[in-house]
Image: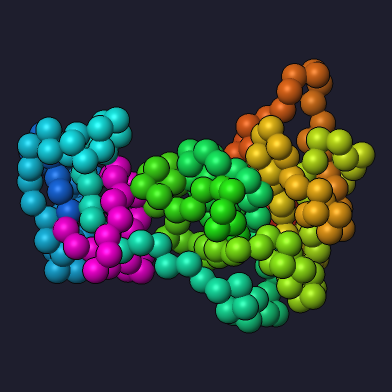
Amino acid sequence: MENTIIFGKNAVIEALESGKREFNKILISNNARSDIKIEQIKKLAQNRGIVYQFVAKEKLNAIEPEGRHQGVIAQIAPVDYIDLDDFIENNKGKNTSVVILDGVEDSHNVGAIIRSCVCAGVNGIILPSRRGVLINSTVEKTSAGATNRIDIIRTNSLVSAVQKLKENDYWVIASDHHAEENYYDIDYTDMNFVLIMGAEHAGISKSLLKMADFKIKIPMLTNFNSLNVSNATAIILFEAVKQKVSKKL
């Protein structure tokens, strides 16, 4: 089995609880034996028949030199990307939302965005096969395991993906600081929508901007450059959450 590495207590717990990923083994620091979350990891591993072993902290540091492992590292199957056609078919008849990341190259940002997407009830996230970050151990750690709770689509062409979504009744919303419309002026409640977020410096590509049905901005009180893309994504998504919750009341 091809393996990838995930680390951090929450990331490992979420992967174990989701049941979606095959585990090879889990390495636990000798110094973490009495930790509550480590005890939870041990119990979940035992229930699934997954091997875990205690090792010196130095061995974990050799695998994850930056020391972010929190005393646990797991060898696990890579994330299972879903085909866009299957995603569209599986979500027919639902009020569906999708986030597309165009050129976001920081793994921490991608992980934080995936975490926000899961909390906001987003159904899927689309990542480009090139010019961007795919799922890696840092993404898994930063997402706190949220990668296991959302459909992740990988595509060679974001333009083709957006076109296919438009053909299936998705409205396309692009976050662009040059836009005239504010993000809270959109009604997110009664439509399937795709939110496109670009990298901080390059922004969204012109080809994708041309395909947008709505271009929105987050108004700011100063002329400071811009918000971090993960923060901006969360702000927009939770406006959609607010509208949906308010509508149900």
Q: For the C terminus, which image quadrant?
A: bottom right
Q: For the N terminus, which image quadrant?
A: bottom left
Position above or below: 216 against 146 = above
Q: Give residue 9's position: percent from left, percent from top.
A: 28, 45
- Tell me which corner region of the image, top left, top right, bottom left or bottom right, holds residue 236: top right
Q: Residue 78 or 132: which is nearer the viewer? A: 132
Residue at coordinates 69% horizontally, 46% vertically from top-left? Answer: 197
Q: Is residue 3 left or right of residue 230?
A: left
Outermost residue to the right? 180
Q: Which residues are magenta?
A: 1-25
Position above or below: 161 against 36 = below
Residue at coordinates 23% horizontally, 63% vertically from top-left? Answer: 23
Residue at coordinates 30% horizontally, 34% vertically from top-left? Answer: 68
Q: How many marks?
A: 0
Residue 195 visible at all: yes
Q: Residue 110 or 43: which is nearer the viewer? A: 110
Asked if the magenta segment contains residue 162, the reply would be: no
Q: Is residue 230 left or right of residue 184?
A: left
Q: Give residue 181's position: percent from left, percent from top.
A: 90, 42
Q: Give residue 107's position: percent from left, percent from top.
A: 48, 41
Q: Is residue 195 left or right of residue 111?
A: right
